Image (cartoon, coloured by chain):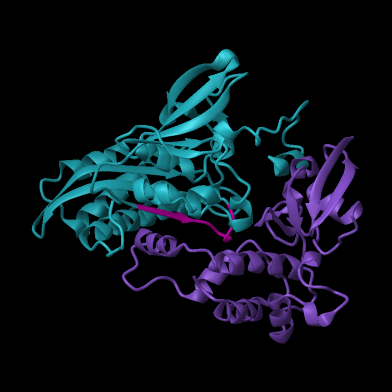
Chain colours: A cyan, B purple
Amino acid sequence: MIPLLKLNLVDVKCLMDLKKIQDLSSISIAKEDGSEIEVGALVRHSEIADSELLWKSVPLLSMTAAGIGHPLVRNRGTIGGSLCHCDPAADYPPTLLNLEAKLSLVSRNSKRRIVSASDFFRGPFETSLERGELLEKIIIPSPRKGSTYAFKKFKLGHSDFPLVVVSVLANFRGESDSIKCEAVAISLAGVAEKAFRATEAEEYLLNRTSLDVDSDFKTAAEITRSLSRPESDIDVSSEYKRRLVGVLTRRTLEESYSKWKKPKQTSWSC
Amino acid sequence: MNRIEFKVNGKLETISVEPRETLLDILRDKIGLTGAKKGCDEAICGCCAVLLNGKPICSCNMLAVEADGSEITTIEGLGDPENNSTLDQLQRAFIKNDAMQCAFCTSGQIISSKAFIMNLQVDNKWLTEVKGVAKGNSEDNEDLETEIKEALSGNLCRCGCYNNIVAAVKEVALATPNV
């Protein structure tokens, strides 16, 4: 927000600081059975990245937050601020699309409406937030038991906005020769007007009766690459970005698979 | 003009600020603490880093009015500049390891390093563990140098003192009692 004001990219008559509203600043379990987690709009990226509750229930979100910008930025930036800004290369949207998250918007007289993440992100810097509305919290259904995940992005400088972001949430089942992909969500940012799910690539993997890890992930990555329409910019060409899509998608799928295949022993379990 | 009140290096300050002034502006121009520097003014370089309620942030990226009621620590709040022997451990390590040339980024580097060292003393072994799981590492958790570099990734050094800066922080980290 502040850099936008300094660069005269936005013009505001009045700025209101919401940070003292406690209700918007917590991470909590929304349903007793733990099937839904709520993250307040004012929760900072560093709080999400350091949250024991989130790492144990929705680790893909924590992993996403842990890589945003750099530590000094993460201590100030909030998930709500990032989502409402809706940069097409931002980190959260592909992860929220995979998680099928919902956003609670509140307006005058406590009127509320719930919008799916996919409906909320409309285009570059454009959301479905209406005048007089405030993003209150993000509601996340807990991923299925046994889910695996991975998140990768490519950026030129360490703290730059990414060129390409790939987020994967998946469920695999089976053993050695007969592995099946039961569920998968592949979402991208930075390569279209807004974050999107590569549904054709997902369907390809879901339809494999027996997954050939070596070639099927490559094919899914190729499908994803063909779905991407990145623009060329001052730093890189669209052709380069599309190539990155193919490489990162394959690596992200492979990492999510190997995490499932060889889970690292931890002192806790989900 | 808004009247704000906050603690800087333990001392209560009450000053009038314009809504448009950043925390960096008033620390330097109104309170006279010029340790924090205006490098990029865009929250990229980290030269303006200060601790806000114990957390390192870019003071150029915060309006002064937002600091009302908070506790700020600047580089001047670490150790005592009049008395060499009471320099902070990190400051001594930076000098010993020759971790600066022009020193423009140094106050920001030390602030971020201070936050990293303070964090080492917090019990969050589970966090190191989950981060290892998240990255699908087959080896053990990330080594100390990688963790330091990540913690200081918001502080740029045009003179290129990174190796010595990491060495200085590592020296202090290894001497810090862990939980």
Query: Which percent across, then down, holds residue A160?
Result: 59, 54
Q: Give the range drawn in magenta.
A: A150-160
Residue B136 vs B87, above or below: the answer is above
A157 with respect to B130 (left or right):
right
Instruction: Give the percent coordinates (x, y) of residue A159.
Output: 59, 57
Closer to us: A191 or A147? A147
Q: Nearer the viewer, residue B54 or B36?
A: B54
Q: Nearer the viewer, residue A204 or A125?
A: A125
**Residue A177 in sight here:** yes
Q: Position of residue B155 (x, y in %)?
A: 67, 64
Q: Quadrant of residue A206?
A: top left
Determine the residue positioned at 59% across, 34% down: A22
Quarter of the image where one finds residue A268: bottom left
Q: Is residue A234 above or below residue A2?
A: below
Q: Is B167 rendered above or below residue B152?
A: below
- State the image coordinates of residue A209 (x, y, percent, origin top left): 10, 46
**Outermost left residue:** A177
Q: Which of A19 and A249 is in front in this view?
A: A19
Q: For residue A212: magenta?
A: no
Could you tell me which residue is drawn at 31 percent across and 36 percent down? Answer: A35
Q: Is residue B18 left or right of residue B162?
A: right
Is A156 magenta? The answer is: yes
Q: Is residue A197 visible?
A: no
Residue at 77%, 61% (x, y): give it: B74
Residue B111 lies left or right of residue A165; in this view the side is right
Label total for image: 0
- Residue at image position (68%, 39%) is A1
**In the displayed structure image, the side of residue A190 where residue A252 appears, left or right:** left
